[in-house]
Amino acid sequence: MKKEKVLIIGSGGQIGVELALALRKVHGTDNVIASDIRDPHPILKESGPFAILNAMDAPAILELIRKEGITQVYLLAAMLSATGEKDPKRAWEVNMQSLLQLLDLGVQEKLSKIYWPSSIAVFGPTTPHHNTPQQTVVEPRTVYGISKYAGELWCQYYHQRWGLDVRSLRYPGLISWKSAPGGGTTDYAVEIYHEALKHKKYTSFLSEDTYLPMMYMDDAIRGTIELMEAPAEMIKTRMSYNLSAMSFSPKEIAASIRKHIPDFTIDYAPDFRQQIADGWPKSIDDSAAREHWNWKHEFDLDKMTAEMLGNLSK
Ligand code: SER
């Protein structure tokens, strides 16, 4: 088997920290270079090679690919839904330019695989909200969603036109304790655990019955690696795969926390993120991922709550 050398761009973010650790187990520590525009997250600093790299700087990425003999790239740098709405043009530029440049580098440098995450944000208010199918009405209303949907189409195009092996998942809201999220609409479901342990109370920026699709980070990382390791013939869509684990509301996550912290209280002060959440699916049909490459989630809400509170309180 050909030895893979992996570059992760945007590795300092919520997904990148844990993905770097997991990929180092798969490919060997020295074969996974983590990179970010900022100084390394403490976990990355101690766990293997790291480079400062701007996801928009194509010449620097090319240089690193050649110098290190990179064969696979994971591009995780992006502006998420809530941050994107504050500076739409910048979000479009960051999210699209970084992808298009990498797709070109992928063809030019004959990379064996590229990974690029998409999101439930590709869906919008006109999409069926319950069990949202893999293929359905797609009319995103956030700049983040627009950039993710356009990106999916570009990935599919590069696959069909140039045979580039680019793979993608539509992540739901991701919940993790090792690294913090930034700028997302689903981030309340991470903050709430921190606040529950620190102050036994939380003010949610989404209303109590706002259901959203969510996933524990362990499942997301395993799913990502399983998708990337699957034989190419199992990947039957070169758009992005729907991926699902659970769906809950702020009220339900609070009830789950109360099983461990009985005097935890929650109140609600919805802000501009409410409108973003209202446009997104409440639950996702991911049967294509389950059928094509055997995706299976492991964590439900209560199992995740136990893990989150247990790890954060250490
Ligand atoms: N977690 C992301 C966000 O809320 C969705 O992909 O922006």
Image (cartoon, grey):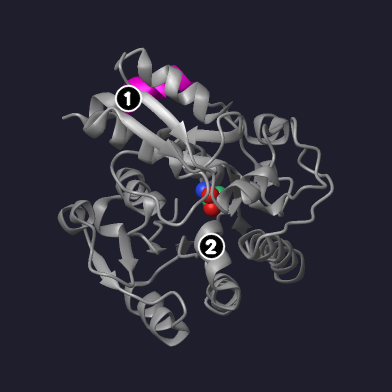
133 shown above or below 93: above
Tell me the residue that label 1 is attached to: 307
Magenta region: 298-308
Please identify the quarter of the rendering in which residue 236 is found.
top right
Dot in front, 1 or 2 = 1
Residue farthest to the bottom?
A: 59
The reply to whether the C-beta atoms of the residues labelled 1 and 2 are less than 8 Å apart is no
Question: Mark 2 belongs to which amino acid?
Answer: Ser
Q: Main secondary structure of the magenta part?
A: helix
Question: Mark 1 belongs to which amino acid?
Answer: Glu
233 shown above or below 239: above
Q: Does residue 300 belong to the magenta stretch?
A: yes
> Can you tell which mark lies on residue 112?
2
CA gap between label 1 and label 2 equals 35 Å
Q: Does residue 68 belong to the magenta stretch?
A: no
* Residue at x-position 28% and y-position 42%: 178
- In the shown orientation, is residue 123 left or right of residue 273? right
Q: Residues within 10 Å of mark 1 (few under 14, many from 20)?
A: some
Q: Residues within 10 Å of mark 2 (few under 14, many from 20)?
A: some
Residue nearer the viewer, 20 or 242: 242
Which type of secondary structure does the marked residue at label 2 adopt?
Answer: loop
